[in-house]
Image (cartoon, rainbow, N blue to C red):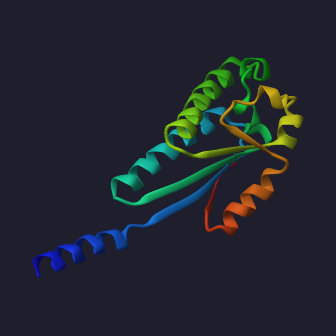
Amino acid sequence: MKYIFLALIIFSGIAQAKEYKAIFDCSSKNSGYIVSRMFLVERTMDMIEKNGDTVKFALTIHGSCAPIVSKNIDEVIMDENNLANMQKARKQLERLATKKGIDVTVCAMSLNANTIDKDDVLPFVKISENSFIDTIGYQNDGYALMTFK
């Protein structure tokens, strides 16, 4: 009887655990805002996991946010304040991808618009023909859309 009760308690805890799925979409040109959001993504992830729930996060990058994925970010962003913020954001982006398992995708059209060669994209970043399609796909798979505008 003890074992049945123990099994029910354990199963009850597992059954109540939630899975949080979100697709973060970054197109902002405000480097200070971008860096703050990158850190907030990790804090949010940690809070969810602390409660025993699971997290599946992904990040799509397009528009003015695209320089964050360039290996040569200092050649793409000339303003020193923006460069410092984007370097912090990029370091956090790399941590999110490599340590936290977040899938990162950049839009090829945005790379082109920002004159970033595909060979200059960080190795952990997937290049998509059109990141809108990826974002829609994530939404269709049950991911909540969170924007960095």
Q: Position of residue 134 (x, y in %)?
A: 75, 56
Quarter where residue 43 is shown? top left
In which quadrant of the rendered view does residue 118 lie?
Answer: top right
Is residue 15 or residue 147 the one in the foreground?
15
Q: Position of residue 104 (x, y in %)?
A: 66, 44
Q: Which quarter of the picture shows residue 105? A: top right
Task: Give the tally of numbered discs.
Answer: 0
Q: Is residue 13 above or below residue 85?
A: below
Residue at x 68% of width, y 61% of height? 138
In the foreground, 11 or 102:
11
Residue toward you, 3 or 115: 3
Coordinates of residue 45 in the picture (x, y in percent): 46, 50
The vertical placement of 70 against 4, above or below, is above
Judge from the rendering whether residue 44 lies leftward or rightward of residue 83; answer left or right: left
Q: Nearer the viewer, residue 106 or 98?
A: 98
- Residue drawn at x 56%, y 42% is 37
| Screen quadrant of the N terminus | bottom left
Q: Residue at x 65, y 67 (%)?
A: 141
Residue extending furthest toward the bottom: 1
Q: Residue at x 25, y 70 (%)?
A: 10
